[in-house]
């Protein structure tokens, strides 16, 4: 790893990629989506402010916990003067995302617990499917595996032998 001087105010795209652990192509993608910004030198090379490191780290962490890029972009747009998120910003944003994360955790726990059971896909090939989804009644609700996504089939509405969720 090439060490960038601590007092360097701007980074090349390669330096930002190396220091952040994010591929150059991902940085270009983030820039195209308006998540990060660079300036161009007279030679048309990108230069990023050093605080872009924190912004990229914020984006990557939010992505790792499952926050969509659109939501991340909207959150960053709320910051005054396009500044980099600080500790208070992260606390506020992560609190706002808590409900969505709780839903996702619940969904994953249901997926884990029901992985060997009927998922409501309509194939009717598992021995248990005729009991859990007789005559593919879940197909009336729409396409896909109807028992996997808690937003499609909330846990309180589900019973194993019910014709609907």
Image (tube, grey):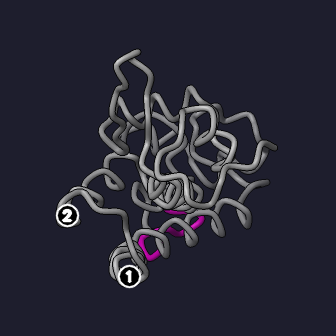
**Residue 39 placement, left or right of 111:** left
Is 159 part of what is drawn in magenta? Answer: yes
Residue 149 at x, y = what percent? Answer: 50, 54
In the displayed structure image, the side of residue 60 where residue 76 appears, left or right: left
Q: Closer to the camera, 76 or 53?
A: 53
- Residue to which mark 1 is pinned: 95
**Which span is picked out in magenta?**
155-164
Q: Is residue 109 magenta?
A: no
Nearer to us in this view, 158 or 54 = 54
Does the image show residue 135?
no
**Quarter of the image with the C terminus in it:** bottom left
61 or 49: which is nearer to us?
49
- Against 30, residue 97 (above or below) is below
Q: Quadrant of residue 51?
A: bottom left
Q: Position of residue 128 (x, y in %)?
A: 74, 51
Q: Quadrant of residue 71?
A: bottom left
Q: Residue at x 63, y 48 (%)?
A: 119
Residue beneath label 2, please?
78
Q: Secondary structure at mark 1?
A: helix
Q: State the image coordinates of residue 25 (x, y, percent, origin top left).
A: 56, 26
Any part of residue 72 in sight: yes
Residue 135 appears left or right of 111: left
Q: Position of residue 129 (x, y in %)?
A: 67, 46
Q: Which residue shows up at 33% across the image and 81% down it?
A: 92
Q: Secondary structure at mark 2?
A: loop
């Amino acid at each position: 790893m090439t060490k960038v001087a601590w007092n360097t105010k701007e980074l090349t795209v390669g330096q930002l990629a190396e220091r952040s652990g994010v591929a150059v192509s991902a940085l270009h993608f983030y820039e195209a989506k308006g998540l990060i910004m660079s300036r161009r030198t007279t030679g048309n090379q990108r230069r990023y402010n050093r605080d872009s490191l924190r912004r990229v780290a914020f984006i990557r962490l939010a992505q790792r916990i499952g926050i969509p890029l659109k939501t991340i972009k909207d959150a960053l747009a709320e910051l005054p003067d396009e500044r980099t998120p600080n500790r208070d910003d992260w606390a506020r944003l992560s609190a706002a995302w808590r409900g969505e994360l709780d839903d996702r955790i619940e969904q994953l726990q249901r997926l884990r617990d029901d992985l060997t059971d009927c998922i409501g896909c309509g194939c009717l090939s598992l021995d248990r499917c005729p009991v859990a989804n007789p005559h593919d009644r879940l197909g009336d609700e729409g396409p896909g595996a109807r028992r996997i996504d808690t937003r499609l089939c909330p846990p309180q509405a589900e019973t194993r032998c019910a014709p609907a969720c």
